Image: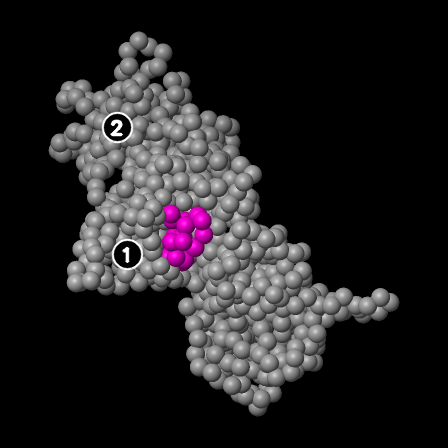
Amino acid sequence: MSVPHSIVEPRRSAPTFVRVLLVCLLWSIVVSSFGAARMEASGPDHLVVSEVMTGGTSASDELIEIYNPSAAPLPLEGLELVYVTASGATVSRRAAWALGAPEVPPGAHVLVANELGVFAPIADVLYASGMAATGGSVAIRIQGATTAIDAVGWGTAASTWLEGTVAPAPAAGASLERLPGGPSGSTIDTDDNAADFILRGTPDPQNSGSPAVPDPAQPSPTPTPAPTATPLPTPTPVPTATPAPTATALPSPILIASARALPEGSLATIEGTALTASDFTDGGGYLADASGGIAVIVDGGSFERGELVRVQGTLDDRFAQRTLRAAAEDLAIVGSGMERAAVASDTGSVNEAVEGRLVRIGGLVEGSPTTLAGGLAFDVDDGSGAVRVIVGTGTGVDTTAWTDGAEVDVTGVVGQRDSSGTGTAGYRLQPRDAADVGAVTSPTPSPSSGESPGPNPSPSASPPPGGVVSITDARAAAKNSRITVRGVVTLASGTIDAGSAVLQDRSGAMLLRLGDEAGDVSRGELLEVDAVRSTWGGMESLRASVPPRRIGSATEPAPRALRTGDASEASEALLVSVRGALVASARRASSGTVSFEIDDGSGPLRVVLGSSLAVDDEALESGAWVEVRGVLGQVTTGAQPLRGYRVWPRGADDLRILASPTEASAGANATGSRTAADGGGGLDGDGASLAAVGEAGLADLRVGATLVTGRWPELGVAGLLWDGTRLVGIAPASAARVDQLLAERAAPLAVELVGLHELPERPRPGISLVRLGRGRDDTVVGAAPVQPPSATLPEPGEGPRGVSVLGRLRGDDGRRTVELNGGSVAVERLCRTAEAEPDGVVSLVGVAL
């Protein structure tokens, strides 16, 4: 251990800047590798801010996630996490770590969250006040430092507490995540927030109990040359070919989402799969990668759908559509790309978040089409708000059946052409060819005059015999009608019960009830089923009594991201993905079924795991944050048709614990200290704090405190007690009891004290002295968290305080000072040690007067 020291605060009212030194500190460590400024490295070897969320359903649904991207443990001790307002005028602490705080292992996280938000149960540290959604910054720094180890600013932030270009402000319910994110960790740090962070529609909170990412148990992949690592190769010339623009070496690309966030006029290089050809519209073509999509206009060059394209150009907003404009020589065809599955979306959610991406919608055509120069425009609405669908004349899409009230299922690239000047209108879905259009269902004819439709009119007539209909049509068909559908099995027989499975196609999904004669079906099978339309437990279903025709196998559709409070008929039987905190610990029924409720702040949703899955529910504790994939089912009665929704996972891999619950919400606040009114020191509220020292009846009270050290002869005490607010010495007469407490344990140690007696003498000015109770059980080890030192020095006139501060140690052995907060504080050594005092930036923990 390095040299213990003591510090006091400079006298602000005096002309000098050094206050008289009185006492010594308990511990001192050199803060290695940090120094007074942030570290510079090609790859992060320091802690980073990995994710930030500024609000969800509630404004308090906030989180700040810290990550260790290095290959070695990194210390938290002596650091703090601060929030800075957009202008930089206010810097406020959100968390602080004293000496002795645990290190962050490689690939591990620390989660800091608002104590009133949905993430509080899984947070490692809680704070009270909020953050502005429109703009601000968070930073990791040495306590009191004027520079950051790492920082991220968003929205309107304009202070020095950010890196490079500000990141975009996340919408409510979304977060900013450092790249690459997810199971790859957050390892990108180019000192440019806009380039390092992407918007994430659903937050991915991870705490100290979450698995390390990347998984250290998995072997590192064999390094292979990536398109981003080296200049593009010159194509091998062939006799009939002219050298192409691919011969020009282009810079390494950034993610498309990062490019979209850059200011207009910025130069950027991206790489993505061409969703369309470069001449798809007058606004160019579209490229997409895993992070997002963007329109690209190439002057004199071209690309074809399906190609992997790298291009460098200038960011522009063309009719509010984010566009990259490039010259032919700045375009390179890297190879064949991989087109990702279309994102399922409500019509009312086609907006900036999915611009440039491939999106699939379903809904009813409203009114007649509008004729445009390049095609027809239709308004389609699924009840969440209409979106315009532009069907180009060159797509080959037959729109004959696209009449008012017709139901359409269509996939296309999202573009924008906003003439309003607001930048928030004009979004449109653009199918590329006939394959992008699924089933088109003609509207139900209106009943003739005087004809009653009945109490429950069927949305459509029974499907024509002998033909395969879409599952959406099957759901709308009359009860007891015979139907043939085709789809992939997303829930196998026996998962929830022996006779139930789920079938899904591009239009929707439906419960399949299988009689004994029909046999069993397995996940991933592509089936054609002849069945009778029915209902079961409130779910629209198909009852099959003959074996289905097994066509082959098919890839499961991507799960639809769903908020827990949004479960409804619109998503019934679909494959979904939800996240949230467990409302209560999981329950196991006598049958072996495990169930629990999760809530992401929008409302609870039940999760039921069948007994056949044999799930271990030990880790499914109240407050744990989990991700669940599965089929959205329903079990209800006719009297409550919109109740009873639940998610049915299909296997153990459909359930992932993102973060385990922590004790933060029941323990310390952001600085780790509790006020005297809280029963500081760890009592449950019915005990007293050290504020009772000096009051009448002290001996009859049960007092909670932290024993921060044992015998300290130079100070004249047998130990020091601290409750986060007040510091009290233990008289030498009680040294034997203190020694007994520390015989098998190390300080700091939470204790509960009865029979305290205040003594008149004081070992140092301002330090009260007490004798411990003499009964065997008068001084015992407590169960509450210990109270770490304060991160701030006492004001003039205040009592002594246990502190933990960082600064630069200067001077010789005769007069040592530490520089912090713009002033110098004298350091007195009251410990016998042969160790040399360190120079440079140190962390000092001890007593300040």
For the point 46% across and 26% down, which residue is it?
Answer: 694
From which residue to which does the magenta span run? 274-297
Q: Which amino acid does the dot numbered 2 rest on?
A: Gly
Q: Which coloring applies here?
A: one colour
Indicate the position of residue 592 as horizontal and vertical percent values: 52, 75
Q: Mark 2 and mark 1: span between their CA atoms?
A: 54 Å
Q: Which amino acid does the dot numbered 1 rest on?
A: Ile
Indicate the position of residue 610 as horizontal and vertical percent values: 52, 74
Indicate the position of residue 721 as horizontal and vertical percent values: 37, 35
For the point 21% across and 49% down, which residue is it?
Answer: 248
Q: Does the segment drawn in magenta span residue 289?
A: yes
Give the quadrant of the C terminus: top left
In the picture provided, is 48 more to the left or to the right than 243? right
Secondary structure of the residue carrying numbered label 1: strand
Precedes in sequence: disc 2 or disc 1: 1
Name the residue that disc number 1 marks. Answer: 333
In the picture provided, is 107 more to the left or to the right than 87? left
Farthest top residue in view: 15
Give the quadrant of the N terminus: top left
Name the residue that disc number 2 marks. Answer: 807
